[in-house]
Image (spheres, coloured by chain):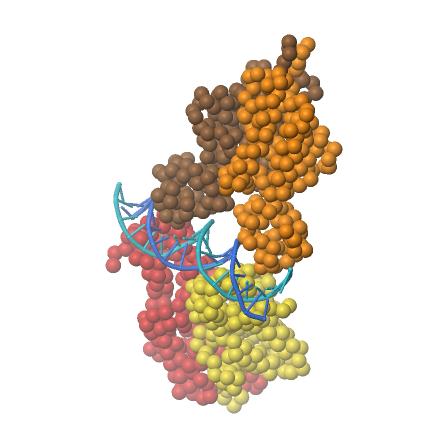
Chain colours: A red, B yellow, C orange, D brown, E blue, F cyan
Amino acid sequence: MPRPSRWDDVVSAAARVFSEKGFGGASLEDVANEVGMLKGSLYNYIKSKEDLLFAIVRPNAEELLDRTRKLKEADLPASEKLRQIAEIHFEIIDRQLPYVTVYVQEIAGKGLSPEWTAMDREYLTLVADVIAEGIEEGDFAESTDARMSARALIGALNWATRWYQPGGPAQARAVAGQLAGIFLGGLLARRRG
Amino acid sequence: MPRPSRWDDVVSAAARVFSEKGFGGASLEDVANEVGMLKGSLYNYIKSKEDLLFAIVRPNAEELLDRTRKLKEADLPASEKLRQIAEIHFEIIDRQLPYVTVYVQEIAGKGLSPEWTAMDREYLTLVADVIAEGIEEGDFAESTDARMSARALIGALNWATRWYQPGGPAQARAVAGQLAGIFLGGLLARRRG
Amino acid sequence: MPRPSRWDDVVSAAARVFSEKGFGGASLEDVANEVGMLKGSLYNYIKSKEDLLFAIVRPNAEELLDRTRKLKEADLPASEKLRQIAEIHFEIIDRQLPYVTVYVQEIAGKGLSPEWTAMDREYLTLVADVIAEGIEEGDFAESTDARMSARALIGALNWATRWYQPGGPAQARAVAGQLAGIFLGGLLARRRG
Amino acid sequence: MPRPSRWDDVVSAAARVFSEKGFGGASLEDVANEVGMLKGSLYNYIKSKEDLLFAIVRPNAEELLDRTRKLKEADLPASEKLRQIAEIHFEIIDRQLPYVTVYVQEIAGKGLSPEWTAMDREYLTLVADVIAEGIEEGDFAESTDARMSARALIGALNWATRWYQPGGPAQARAVAGQLAGIFLGGLLARRRG
DNA sequence: TATGAATGAGACTTCATTCAT
DNA sequence: GATGAATGAAGTCTCATTCAT
């Protein structure tokens, strides 16, 4: 799919603009200004505003899904997989905050279209499966509700788009580690554990 | 302040409409239709569309803050307080889902105005303080980052607006209990703990 | 024509409001606020917004016309009549500035309705007749164009609504005297005249 | 600054419409109809309705000011300058009646913004200065109040927007001459003067 | 590819007016 | 007489989209 030369400019400008003003609050003129062209010219690149929204979000959503799919198949203990789920999620947030913000704000969990519903569901299932593995393997407590735990984790990760400020891979990994730690170990002190 | 008679109708209709279509995506005509009046008539009740947004959200936000403030002062162990934080949050989500959805989607963590920034910050601080108490009292692990843990918990709770389906107080309490359990005990099995 | 008790309040409030914001720029709610009642209540006094405009303006326009009619019939030299025309005009401006402002701004010379066109024309004719008298009597220069001179004088007087600040009868008389002096004697110095 | 192609159409249509119906009484739809486009399309040319008002009026106001400024500096007797002030004013009225009507009706002497207040004041001062010159040079009577005379003259000239019907430069000059004559010589016959 | 202009629908908001109480 | 509420039309302005150049 050979894209016109300034395709990337358009998409990244739109990501910035949509993440700042929201999809509904931003106009295509805002986007065009950010790229440095007139709004009419945008239609050389897109077919509609919604198109642009999906174009922003799809590559990152697919990357997240791909990497998580592979991780699930990896030969690692569930707790390590969970840690890496957080790391992948945060690595993308750190590197692509505007894109992810748009995804979280406008699409995730909203059932906009079958395609996105399916993506949401797959990601939820992947995370829940990892947790279920952990339970089966005896690493995670038997009483754990895998699906709800997955939702809690995903919520905590997505919510980071409202407070996290990108600081590079190392920082992203650190924060992800802390969050994973909370979900794995809980807040309670382990007395003589 | 005595409100005109259909004030409550207006607010609840707006909450439903905004939570379904989003604040930006919903028109005042949508709201008016839901109440059963003409869009011009809405202006007997509100001064602007934004006004209506805040009117929807403020009472619930204040209830959450009030109850959490009181809880913080209560004479209970931190772990019990944390559990009740989740219960309060979920009780309001269960009872007022459209309102909370609007709040989470349109306001929380967005820094729209000093007033809302302050509310967000106070809630975060309240939750973080409870966690800090738990650390001081030795109930929670020393290594815990109170502020980040609070953010994780709040994110997990707010994210529920995208998946939770109200089912009455008992269900709300059950779900809250499970989430609190995850944050307190973690996913890991406690061997001989 | 027995008027309801607060008729005068309504009219004077409207005069103030219309003269500040203009007829088009002012809303009946503005007027109602100024009186201290609700806008619906105004309709106990008026039949329409335009009604109110005319009610504001008519008594003063009639007073001006009446007094000028009588003056024209008086047994005085034309130059003295001209002086008194200015005095009457300014006395009303001084005493009723908001009303006159509304008249000048919204009605005078605009041909809104036959009634007002007739009033405008009568006033113009009265002033022009006085000037014509002066020409006939040899007091005013033969070359004078009575109608145009009348228009110049009326313009200068009406324009005062944009700069004059009421200061009581004495001041009004003084200013009127100066303006009349300009129209009578002109600016040129009378060398050995 | 290269203007879009139909900029002049828009401005002249707006001038016509505003001068007929008043700024407040005219809608942008009226203007758009007059140009032959849809009301939304106007916003390719203007940023707001007020913008359009100022765009109509500014060039003419500036022309009047510029020419009057230069005139003041000219090496002519004050009486001749005064005559030319009237001629300039009337030449613009004759050529641009709708524009000037809008200015007189909506802006002059109303203190809408510092910019217009300053323009009004400068014009008043220019005229008053010319009169003051005449007094100093002994051409005008010592008793003359320069500022008030200027106001009278400006009022008489502006008022012409309510009665003058354009008839070309020659007629404009003739009318201006008569008005100037009134202000210079006064109405009184000069007996053996 | 980019531009400038136009379109047309629809948004928020105002407001004169009416009316039951 | 006054009130609170509703009406419905109209107004200003925005914006996704189209299209000739």
Could you tell me which quadrant the C terminus of chain D lies in? top right
Residue in view at x 49 percent, y 61 percent: B40
| Image x and y of residue A185, in percent | 51, 80
Count of labels in the image:
0
Residue A173 vertical position relative to residue C180 in the rendered view, above or below: below
Q: Is residue B12 left or right of residue F21?
A: right
Q: Is residue D156 left or right of residue A180?
A: right
Residue C100 vertical position relative to residue A124 in the rendered view, above or below: above
Residue A105 vertical position relative to residue D171 in the rendered view, above or below: below
| Image x and y of residue C155, in percent | 58, 31
Residue in view at x 60 percent, y 53 percent: C30
| Image x and y of residue D34, in percent | 38, 42
Could you tell me which quadrant the N terminus of chain D lies in? top left
Residue in view at x 58 percent, y 21 percent: D182
Residue in view at x 40 percent, y 71 percent: A110
- The part of the image, by quadrant, that contains residue A107 is bottom left
- The part of the image, by quadrant, that contains residue D71 is top right
| Residue nearer the viewer, F10 or A143 | F10
Q: Is residue C52 left or right of residue A93?
A: right
Residue furthest right as drawn: C170
| Image x and y of residue C82, in percent | 65, 26
Q: Is residue F18 left or right of residue D161?
A: left
The answer to whether residue B96 is seen in the rendering is yes
The answer to whether residue B145 is seen in the rendering is no
| Residue nearer the viewer, C55 or B8 | C55
